[in-house]
Image: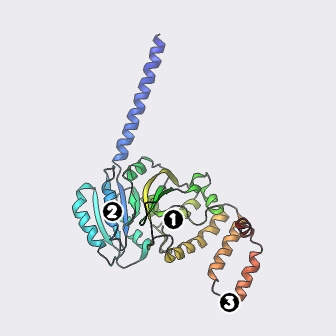
Amino acid sequence: MGSISKRMHLGQVQKNDRIIQNNFKLKTTMHKLISICVITYNSSKYIEDTLNSILLQDYSHIEVLIGDDCSTDNTPDICRNWIEKNKNRFVNCKFVQTPANCGIVGNYNNVWPLAGGDWIKFIAGDDLLKHDCISTFANNTEDDIDIMCCLRENFRNDSDERWITGEEHLRHPDQLRQVVTKHHYGIVCGATLFVRKKYLADNGGFDERYVFAEDYPICMKYLLQGKTIKQIEKPLVEYRNYASVSHSGNPIFLKSHTEAMIEFLPKAALHCRLLHYWYHFKLFGLECRYADRNSFKKLGLYILKAFDIVGYKKRLTAK
């Protein structure tokens, strides 16, 4: 009986130790400073809703940095007034503007170096954070992960329709291969992005060659380094679907995104040793480059397409 009692006592001690460790971890996490960088440009219609969604977070240790890209409406006034009214709720609140209008990526790079937290949550001035967004991210950070994302709840201005989406390719063990073979166009929706500041600092921030595509280049670079993006399988962001400068349907955005695809997809295909995909993506780049050129070059591309196995399979599947 003595040995049984001793084992029961030992089991209870171990259980208590686990509870103490978990509580300590939770307490430590809740005191980890998280920086929220809000990116704005002529966002006066929605920016207060975005900022109020930050105000309602169930996580206490937050700083708010608002980066504005020289808005021509009253977005700056709204932001300054909101900061003055709510600054005592946060560890730090700051509004900064770019020296000149420089696009989404330049705005990102103007604001993130000011962050005091180890992790940064980026959000556009027309999207919303769920009340538990920051606490959930903070509780899911890992030492060997530098980029995280979550599911998003999409909504439209002109209807009550809502739908939840995530990144299917991030649920596979070889994320880069999945991007190359199944999901060329996108990796992580920028609205769900959560990035370690040190990673940005070590890798030169966001790539300003792609003025309106901040998420794709940095995520491709990250995957090419052999790393894994962690996706939290919970909608923590509300993503507004409508025509805007940052929306994926915008032609300016599409141009930047296409340029990034032309650079990174062939590299990714070679990294995965998928030579037929490398050939396909190189042809894609040539098509974009010579779309408006003379018929001789177009004829050359037509001939090269005869050897494009991936393109042939796509056309066959489409039929």
Residue type beneath disc 3: Asn
Q: Is residue 291 visible?
A: yes
Residue lying at 29% horizontally and 74% vertically, measured from the top left: 74
Q: Is residue 201 visible?
A: no
The x and y percentages for residue 66 are 33, 66
How far apart, in angstroms, are the residues tagged by discs 3 and 2?
A: 50 Å
Q: Secondary structure at mark 3?
A: loop
Query: Dot 2 corresponds to which residue?
Result: 49
Residue 76 vertical position relative to residue 202 in the rendered view, above or below: below
Q: Residue furthest front?
A: 159
Examine the image and state in which quarter residue 70 appears.
bottom left
Query: Dot 1 corresponds to which residue?
Result: 218
Q: How many other residues sit within 10 Å of disc 1, few (<14), some (14-19) or many (≥20)?
A: many
Residue type beneath disc 2: Asp
Q: Residue furthest top?
A: 1
Examine the image and state in which quarter residue 187 appears.
bottom right
How far apart, in angstroms, are the residues tagged by discs 1 and 2?
A: 28 Å
How far apart, in angstroms, are the residues tagged by discs 1 and 3?
A: 35 Å
* Residue 294, disc: 3
Q: How many other residues sit within 10 Å of disc 2, few (<14), some (14-19) or many (≥20)?
A: some
Residue lying at 50% horizontally and 52% vertically, measured from the top left: 145
Q: In terms of sequence position, does the residue under pointer 1 or pointer 3 come before the other? A: 1
Mark 1 and mark 3 in contact? Answer it, CB < 8 Å. Answer: no
* Residue 6, disc: none
